[in-house]
């Protein structure tokens, strides 16, 4: 299988997420697990980055707009070589650099401190516009939650990105259908997401967010699109890879017990 390597990396990322959140006793596993394949694809193939030179001028940047899923970014950065995996096991501990939400001043490879929903994509628009002005070839990628796009400033950012023709910007929506209070449709309907982005002037690509062929093809389409930003609507499963977490809103922000964590790691192909 051409993508076996990426699938193996994504499995390690998921295992790291489960271990870290269990050790912390708090965190957000559901949305971290749903985004693992997308984040793996970005850090391990798509983006121009170098762990040995994390601040190189022409690097691509990833902004985790849904900042509560910080563990998946921490895990991907660790697996990519920015720091030892064991370091992120201090997640949410007093004095740890690995806070509940990413901090750009503390964690190598984190480009923006996020957590307040909607601000990540807004900052991403600014970064992409700055690159255009500076003639910097670096691209900007941002990952949003589907519940996050209920925030009004998301759409101000979307409107601005289209206005300035930011074809160096890619927004990926982790469309798992659930948020902290339950189903998106019950809390505040966000569908049709694809039509909304298109109406704002974006190039839109709809994919299975757990299929690496589709993920990489979507990134290729984004690079080929000129004159407008690209939105990738990635259909995902909240809690992906762990049977008792999949499609369960209750696992949005709850840590697994030791027994649950052991089962999760085993299902993901790891050893406790």
Image (cartoon, rainbow, N blue to C red):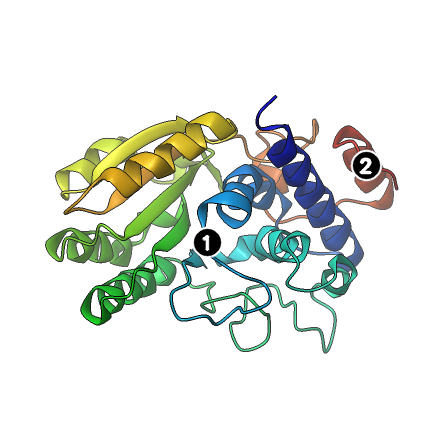
Residue plotted at (69% across, 66% down): 92
Instruction: Please tell me in which quadrant of the rendered image residue 166 appears.
Output: bottom left
Image-based side of 177 in relation to 266, left or right: left
Query: Is residue 176 visible in the rendered structure shown here?
Result: yes
Total count of labels: 2
Residue nearer the viewer, 217 or 203: 217
Residue nearer the viewer, 34 or 146: 34
**Numbered tag placed on residue 89 in the rendering:** none
When the figure is inspected, residue 122 is found, relative to residue 188, above or below; the finding is: below
Name the spot of residue 262 as percent of width and height, x first. Answer: 85, 38
Name the spot of residue 148 as percent of width and height, x first. Answer: 39, 49
**Numbered tag placed on residue 270 in the rendering:** 2
Structural crowding at the residue carrying mark 1, measured as other residues with C-alpha within 10 Å and reported as few (<14), some (14–19) or many (≥20): many
Q: Which mark is first along the chain, 2 or 1?
A: 1
Q: Name the residue under label 1.
A: 66
Residue plotted at (47% across, 69% down): 113
Gap in Å between the C-alphas at discs 1 and 2? 27 Å
Q: Disc 1 on helix, strand or loop?
A: loop
């Amino acid at each position: 299988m051409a993508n076996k390597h990426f699938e193996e990396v994504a499995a390690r990322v998921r295992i790291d997420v489960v271990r870290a959140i269990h050790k912390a006793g708090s965190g957000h596993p559901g949305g971290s697990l749903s985004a693992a394949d997308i984040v793996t694809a970005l850090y391990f193939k798509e983006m121009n980055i170098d762990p040995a030179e994390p601040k190189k001028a022409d690097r691509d940047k990833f902004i985790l707009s849904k900042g509560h899923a910080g563990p998946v970014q921490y895990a991907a950065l660790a697996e990519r070589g920015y720091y030892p995996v064991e370091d992120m096991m201090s997640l949410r501990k007093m004095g740890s650099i690995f806070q509940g939400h990413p901090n750009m001043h503390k964690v190598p490879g984190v480009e923006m401190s996020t957590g307040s929903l909607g601000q990540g994509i807004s900052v991403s628009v600014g970064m992409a516009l700055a690159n255009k002005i500076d003639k910097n070839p670096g691209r900007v990628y941002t990952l949003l939650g589907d519940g996050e796009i209920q925030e009004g400033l998301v759409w101000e950012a979307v409107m601005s990105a289209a206005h300035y023709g930011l074809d160096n910007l890619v927004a990926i929506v982790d469309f798992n259908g659930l948020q902290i209070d339950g189903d998106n449709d019950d809390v505040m309907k966000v569908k049709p997401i694809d039509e909304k982005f298109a109406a704002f002037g974006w190039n839109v690509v709809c994919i299975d967010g757990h299929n690496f062929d589709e993920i990489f093809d979507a990134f290729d389409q984004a690079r080929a699109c000129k004159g407008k930003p690209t939105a990738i609507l990635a259909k995902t499963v909240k809690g992906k890879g762990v049977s008792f977490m999949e499609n369960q809103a209750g696992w949005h922000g709850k840590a697994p017990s030791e027994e649950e964590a052991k089962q999760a790691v085993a299902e993901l192909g790891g050893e406790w």
